[in-house]
């Protein structure tokens, strides 16, 4: 990847080429790699490198662009000349572009040495550790360890230099019984400090769930107290962030900052500059992002986008943190008289856009809690629930951890998500799968 100094040298070289009033450069380079393993062996070790640079020239009211993947001096000069030629043949714009000047961003170091050097050898050692533990515990593990290292920069001759470099990794694991009688999931995503990834703990947790989920018993559908582990809560939370970004639909009609709309235990922030997430501190238009509180103890504080926007300083999914406590999931179980521990949500689909009613299924570990203890595995359920209702019914929150909110495990959309206890979660029918 390219460092800040290397990118600055490239952009300065382009800016020193004469012939344009204003020059813009869009730069990107990336390494996307990962190791997949299943059935006690590595099944794939993947790597993809990419880089691209686009030069846009402004001469009066004329604009031209050209792109290249070759960053040699000769290629940069050719690309610049092509941009100038394209501009000369372009029609005049009604209003010449006004380029943004230098900006001040919250500093963030998103490339730690452990993540930058995290390669196939380090991933293989993690796989070996995980496989050994799975074998010892009598389970079969299937996992994915992706790494992302990316550099982006928007720069221009007016002083803008919006540079961000990030390196992160994840460890996602499903352990199953060889006969398919039990399954368990554990993982962590979007990690900048590789020391936070503990393959021993992740494998032990996933394997124990697989072992404990055998001989699951069917319970009657109905409304249950549930403890959603961070991955399940992350997926549930992702269903409602759009209401804060101008897409609130019927639910947000008439809502304004100061209105109480969720549980006192629900606080949601874009903690721009967060030292764990270490995500970009610049908005899509290259203006500086700033920390924003969206909901505080259930009270609406800010909206992003749409006609009622009150906060242009961040978007809802930037450095997202759902505040929690120091409670572990085990602590929360001890404080629950009767309920279900939910590991994972699968195949979530919308039912009613107006109310954000969604349906999905539990997977990879569902357990009955009685008098502060897990007493037995439970046959999986299909559920119907809206996060607008669920986050009104939060009765306990735990310690946040980095977790992806999307269906895939791209570290770019990880947030700090705690386990939560929600009352009256509607389990509609039995789902016959592990």
Image (cartoon, rainbow, N blue to C red):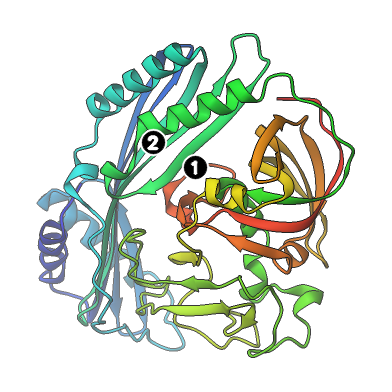
Establish if 148 lies above or below 269. Answer: above
User: Can I make out residue 347 in this image?
Assistant: yes
The percent position of residue 337, horizontal first and vertical second, equals: 72, 50
Quadrant of image for the C terminus:
top right
Label 1: element kind: loop
As drawn, the label of residue 240 is: none
Answer above or below: position of 131 versus 161: above
Q: Earlier in the sequence, mark 1 or mark 2?
A: 2
Residue 34 in sight here: no
Discs 1, 2 touching: Cβ within 8 Å: yes
Q: How many marks?
A: 2
Mark 2 neighbour density, 10 Å: few (under 14) some (14–19) many (20 or more): many
In front: 406, or 331?
A: 331
Horizontal arrangement in the rendering, residue 59 relative to residue 341 (left or right): left
Say which quarter of the image contains residue 217.
top right
Q: Nearer the viewer, residue 136 or 287?
A: 136
Percent position (x, y) of residue 368?
72, 38
Residue, disc 1 = 409
Residue in view at x 74 percent, y 47 percent: 339
Q: Residue at x 26, y 42 (%)?
A: 195
Q: Is 109 drawn above or below residue 265 in the view shown?
A: above
Dividing the picture into quarters, in which one does residue 102 lie? bottom left
Q: Which residue is mark 2?
A: 146
Is 311 left, or right, of 233 in this rendering?
left
Mark 1 crowdedness (10 Å alpha carbons): few <14, some 14-19, many ≥20: many
Q: Position of residue 410 (x, y in %)?
A: 46, 45
Report the residue that reaches farthest toward the top.
179
Q: Who's the residue at 65% across and 50% down the image?
A: 227
> 221 left or right of 269?
right
Q: Residue furthest front?
A: 371
Image location of residue 132, percent across then percent down: 37, 15
């Amino acid at each position: 990847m390219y460092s800040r100094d290397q990118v600055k040298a490239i952009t300065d070289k382009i800016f020193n080429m004469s012939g344009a009033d204003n020059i813009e450069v869009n730069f990107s380079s990336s390494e996307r790699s990962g190791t997949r393993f299943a059935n006690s062996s590595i099944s794939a070790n993947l790597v993809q490198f990419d880089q691209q640079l686009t030069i846009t020239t402004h001469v009066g009211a004329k604009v031209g662009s050209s792109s290249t993947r070759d960053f040699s001096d000769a290629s940069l000069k050719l690309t610049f000349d092509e941009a100038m030629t394209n501009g000369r043949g372009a029609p005049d714009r009604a209003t010449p572009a006004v380029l943004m000047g230098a900006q001040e961003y919250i500093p963030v170091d998103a490339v730690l040495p452990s993540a930058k050097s995290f390669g196939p050898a380090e991933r293989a050692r993690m796989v070996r550790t995980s496989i050994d533990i799975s074998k010892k515990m009598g389970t079969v593990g299937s996992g994915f360890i992706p790494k992302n290292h990316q550099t982006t920069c928007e720069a221009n001759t007016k002083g803008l230099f919006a540079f961000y470099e990030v390196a992160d990794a994840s460890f996602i694991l499903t352990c199953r019984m060889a006969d398919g009688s039990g399954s368990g999931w554990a993982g962590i995503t979007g990690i900048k400090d590789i020391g936070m990834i503990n393959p021993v703990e992740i494998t032990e947790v996933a394997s124990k769930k697989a072992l404990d989920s055998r001989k699951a018993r069917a319970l009657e559908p109905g409304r249950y107290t549930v403890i959603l582990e961070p991955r399940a809560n992350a997926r549930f939370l992702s269903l409602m962030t759009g209401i804060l970004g101008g897409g609130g639909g019927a639910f947000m009609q008439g809502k304004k900052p100061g209105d109480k709309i969720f549980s006192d235990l629900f606080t949601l922030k874009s903690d721009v500059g967060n030292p764990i997430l270490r995500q970009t501190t610049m908005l899509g238009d290259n203006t500086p992002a700033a920390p924003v509180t969206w909901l505080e103890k259930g009270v609406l504080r800010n909206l992003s986008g749409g006609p009622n926007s009150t906060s242009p300083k961040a978007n809802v999914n930037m450095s997202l943190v759902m505040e929690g406590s120091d409670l572990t999931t085990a602590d929360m179980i001890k404080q629950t008289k009767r309920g279900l521990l939910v590991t994972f949500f699968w195949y979530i689909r919308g039912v009613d856009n107006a109310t954000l009613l969604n349906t999905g299924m539990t997977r990879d570990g569902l357990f009955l809690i009685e008098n502060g203890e897990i007493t037995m595995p439970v046959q999986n359920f299909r559920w119907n629930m809206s996060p607008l209702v669920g986050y009104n019914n939060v009765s306990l929150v735990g310690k946040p951890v980095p977790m992806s909110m999307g269906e895939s495990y791209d570290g770019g959309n990880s947030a700090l998500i705690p386990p939560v206890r929600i009352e009256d979660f509607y389990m509609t029918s039995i789902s016959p799968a592990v």
